[in-house]
Image (spheres, helix red, strand yellow):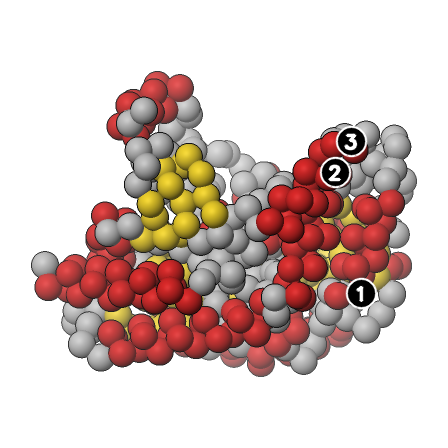
């Protein structure tokens, strides 16, 4: 079967609302490599959008899922519970930042984790309003979409957003927005739009993901924590894209000297099986009445089994350290390339959550075309890259943390050749 034949069928069968970065139909995958239906091999610097941090089909993850598959696939934890769900909650309660008693709830997708974090925050505070940031991404459900700080394609045409959701500017030095501007934005919201006594939570990604891989400055996190404490607001860290060793620590919030009250997780948690979680202060997590949280598939046994294996692999293979080392190598290489590519205006990111940002050669405007051309060029040379950013002018690098040295070296050569080819074009 050819990719082009399936692409034609896709056009007929699948809603145009589902976006697409490639027309390469996957046949099999192993660690950091994938093969399509035509037998062409690619190096995967997307990892299913930051999901298979432990590589495609890690043998330990596969084995754990196979064992669970043979025992039972689904009972619904609310009907017939199972021990490994409890044990995974214990492991997350132990590992999620915060030196206090914690509890966890499992759901299925990232958006659902965000929805539930907001429900819990509302139940615990008796307040309604939520503050998020411009450029943020929190999902495609109604609350997730409302919290998301980018209109097209996420909100356009989908009608009214949820009430009582407000956005503050996210500080990005490169774009001329400082931490002081961000905090002034929130103070302005308190003056013009919402009484702080009505705000249940502030939700923030420690590193904005879809929005462009912009790390939240430590000073911002400290200021938000202080503001939350002053007004009785809960701080929610959305670690859905940053989680599970990607940033060089298990959670990105470990890199800050303040802790959130609630943390959302998904993606890297279960190595490709759909599993998501909210973990937070025990008394806050207990605010929802029994039956108010959960779902038929929340904490599905296969996802739970996979997540245990993922946590084991991260520890055994020291993937936090590996993320830091790989990220360093990638940033060094990009910095070298940058010396003669004026379009590359920034190279950044903690651990192996690295991105390069592109502007027009005179530096005056975001250059999404350049970023897209590099992505297409790399794809034609066998390397899968993803773009991101409110202006679409950022390339993010999300290879599995288990990528072998020789494959990584090969990918870096393809990346360099692709950037130079586009620059020279
Ligand atoms: N929050 C963040 C920070 C994300 O990166 C994403 C997914 N890109 C989501 C929420 C939504 O997750 P899902 O697609 O699993 O619903």
Left/right of residue 277 with respect to residue 367 in the rendered view: right
- Residue name at image x 22 percent, y 69 percent: 343
Q: Residues within 10 Å of mark 2 (few under 14, many from 20)?
A: some
Q: Earlier in the sequence, mark 1 or mark 2?
A: 2
Spatial CA distance of label 1 from label 3 is: 27 Å
Look at the image and tell me in which quarter the N terminus lies: top left
Pick the residue in front: 399 or 233. Answer: 399
Pick the residue in front: 117 or 424. Answer: 424
Spatial CA distance of label 2 from label 3 is: 6 Å
Which residue is under mark 2? 68
The location of residue 342, given as percent across then percent down, is: 20, 73
Element type at marker 1? Answer: helix
- Residue name at image x 38 percent, y 28 percent: 16
Q: Earlier in the sequence, mark 1 or mark 3?
A: 3
The location of residue 255, given as percent across then percent down, is: 61, 76
Tell us which disc is closer to us: 1 or 2.
Answer: 2
The location of residue 19, given as percent across then percent down, is: 39, 37
Pick the residue in front: 271 or 99. Answer: 271
Which residue is under mark 1? 94
Which residue is under mark 3? 72
Whether tag 2 and tag 3 are in contact, CB under 8 A, the answer is yes
Whether tag 1 and tag 3 are in contact, CB under 8 A, the answer is no
Q: Residues within 10 Å of mark 1 (few under 14, many from 20)?
A: some
- Residue name at image x 47 percent, y 47 percent: 30
Specify the quadrant of the image occupied by residue 21. Answer: top left
Quick check: can you spot residue 284?
A: no
């Amino acid at each position: 079967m050819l990719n082009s034949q399936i692409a034609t069928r896709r056009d007929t069968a699948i809603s145009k609302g589902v976006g697409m970065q490639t027309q390469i139909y996957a046949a099999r995958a192993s660690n950091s490599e994938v093969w399509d239906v035509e037998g062409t091999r690619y190096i995967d610097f997307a990892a299913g959008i930051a999901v298979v941090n432990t590589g495609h089909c890690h043998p330990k993850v596969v084995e754990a899922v196979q064992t669970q598959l043979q025992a039972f696939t689904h009972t619904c934890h609310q009907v017939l519970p199972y021990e490994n769900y409890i044990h995974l909650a214990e492991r997350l309660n132990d590992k999620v930042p915060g030196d206090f008693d914690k509890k966890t709830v499992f759901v299925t997708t990232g958006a659902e984790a965000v929805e539930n974090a907001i429900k819990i925050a509302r139940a615990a505070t008796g307040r309604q309003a939520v503050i998020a940031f411009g450029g943020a991404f929190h999902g495609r459900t109604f609350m997730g979409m409302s919290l998301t700080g980018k209109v097209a394609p996420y909100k356009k045409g989908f009608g009214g957003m949820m009430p009582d959701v407000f956005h503050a500017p996210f500080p990005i030095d490169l774009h001329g927005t400082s931490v002081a501007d961000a905090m002034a934005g929130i103070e302005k919201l308190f003056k013009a739009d919402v009484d702080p006594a009505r705000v249940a939570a502030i939700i923030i990604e420690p590193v904005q993901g879809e929005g462009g891989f912009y790390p939240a400055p430590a000073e911002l996190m400290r200021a938000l924590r202080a503001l939350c404490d002053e007004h009785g607001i809960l701080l929610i860290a959305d670690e859905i894209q940053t989680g599970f060793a990607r940033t060089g620590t298990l959670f990105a919030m470990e890199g800050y000297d303040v802790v959130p009250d609630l943390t959302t997780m998904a993606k890297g948690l279960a190595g490709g099986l759909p599993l998501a979680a909210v973990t937070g202060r025990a008394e806050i997590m207990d605010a929802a009445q029994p039956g108010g949280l959960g779902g038929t598939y929340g904490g599905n046994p296969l996802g739970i089994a996979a997540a245990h294996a993922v946590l084991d692999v991260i520890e055994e293979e020291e993937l936090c350290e590996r993320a830091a080392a790989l990220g360093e190598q990638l940033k060094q290489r990009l910095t070298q390339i940058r010396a003669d590519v004026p379009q590359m205006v920034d190279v950044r990111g903690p651990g192996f959550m690295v991105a390069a940002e592109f502007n027009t050669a005179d530096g005056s405007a975001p250059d999404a075309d350049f970023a897209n051309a590099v992505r297409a060029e790399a794809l034609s040379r066998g390397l899968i890259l993803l773009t991101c950013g409110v202006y679409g002018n950022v390339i993010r690098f999300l290879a599995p943390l288990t990528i072998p040295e020789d494959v990584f070296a090969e990918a870096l050569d393809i990346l360099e050749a692709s950037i130079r080819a586009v620059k020279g074009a």
